[in-house]
Image (cartoon, rainbow, N blue to C red):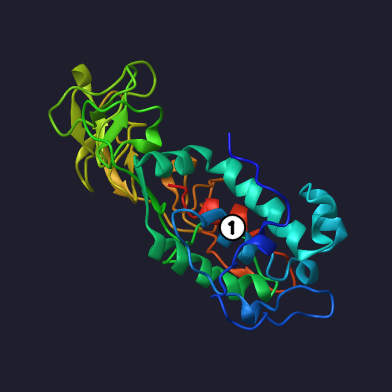
């Protein structure tokens, strides 16, 4: 579990302002002006910095009704309490990653994390809300945390294993199998490296590309689906269909939605006048 630190943490730490700087300017409600906020992520303060961005203009953009909906309660009454709540929420969500950093088993890309929060800051202060997870901010895409443990090293969880490895049943990092190797694991979710699938006899094989044979319902390469040709015969990988084209299953469509015709592919967009939940948005950037 994350370590619960004393309230009003920002009053005890620098909060991004160098020692000797003038006190940051504040609005009439006592909230630090967004233009005064400086992001500087380190391995020790990631959640504190995220909380600064999350609470940059929360009292102006969000309101009592929103606060009640997301269980923020009275935490919008002042900026220190808002930052405390956001920081604890972050520490709870990232408990395994943060513990791994302390143990030296996980590395935090401080520059990447800082760039993402810097890009989120002006969006939050303008009271924008991201309404689709389909498009990611370039500086935020992908986790800033990376495991460092490799084959045979003890792992309490997946976050501590390096790319290309997974924490196995014996709690040791094992290599994710490549083409021609036996699939890792059993049951409903055997594992192979990216771009591969677990084929006949439990062997990892490359996902077929456009025009290549495939088992109907099986995965083709990205952007393709397995088109059924004749009953009892293999299908063929084909490009997913665009909005308005006829279809018989969701998997045939770019938008993943079929009702006789493929639905529209919703592009990520920002809507004005709404509140941005920075913490949840940040997590959505990491979805595959």
Residue 54's spot in the image, x, y percent? 65, 62
The 10 Å Cα crowd at callout 1, few under 14, some 14 to 19, many 20 or more, is: many
Q: Is residue 34 left or right of residue 197?
A: right
Outermost residue to the left? 180
Outermost residue to the front? 20
Residue 259's spot in the image, x, y percent? 57, 45
Q: Is residue 168 left or right of residue 112?
A: left
**280 or 170, which is in the foreground?**
170
**Quarter the N terminus occupies:** top right
Task: Examine the image and state in which quarter residue 234 appears.
Answer: top left
Secondary structure category for the residue under label 1: helix
Q: Is residue 243 depicted above or below 180 in this figure? A: below
Where does label 1 land, which residue?
48
Q: Is residue 232 left or right of residue 212?
A: right
Residue name at image x 35 percent, y 42 percent: 104
**41 or 90, which is in the foreground?**
41
């Amino acid at each position: 579990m994350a370590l619960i630190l004393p309230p009003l943490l920002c009053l005890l730490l620098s909060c991004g302002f160098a020692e000797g700087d003038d006190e940051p300017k504040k609005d009439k409600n006592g909230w630090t002006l967004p233009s005064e906020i400086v992001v500087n992520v380190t391995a020790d303060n990631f959640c504190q910095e995220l909380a600064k961005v999350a609470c940059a203009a929360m009292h102006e953009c969000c309101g009592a009704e929103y606060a009640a909906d997301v269980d923020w309660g009275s935490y919008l009454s002042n900026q220190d309490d808002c930052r405390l709540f956001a920081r604890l929420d972050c520490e709870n969500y990232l408990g395994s990653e943060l513990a791994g950093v302390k143990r030296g088993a996980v590395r935090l890309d401080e520059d990447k994390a800082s760039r993402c929060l810097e890009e989120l800051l002006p969006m939050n202060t303008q009271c924008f809300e991201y309404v689709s997870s389909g498009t990611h901010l370039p500086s935020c895409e992908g986790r800033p945390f990376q495991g460092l443990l490799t084959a045979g090293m003890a792992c309490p969880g997946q976050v501590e294993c390096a790319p290309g490895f997974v924490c196995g049943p014996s709690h040791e990092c094992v290599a994710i199998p490549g083409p021609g190797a036996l699939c890792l694991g059993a049951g409903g979710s055997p594992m192979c490296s990216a771009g591969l699938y677990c084929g006949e006899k439990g062997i990892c094989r490359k996902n077929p590309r456009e025009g290549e044979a495939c088992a109907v319902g099986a995965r083709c390469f990205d952007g393709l689906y397995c088109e059924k040709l004749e009953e009892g015969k293999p299908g063929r990988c084909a490009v997913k269909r665009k909005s308005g084209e006829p279809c018989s299953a969701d998997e045939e469509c770019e938008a993943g939605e079929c009702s006789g015709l493929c639905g529209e592919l919703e592009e990520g967009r920002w809507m004005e006048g709404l509140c941005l939940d920075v913490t949840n948005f940040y997590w959505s950037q990491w979805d595959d």
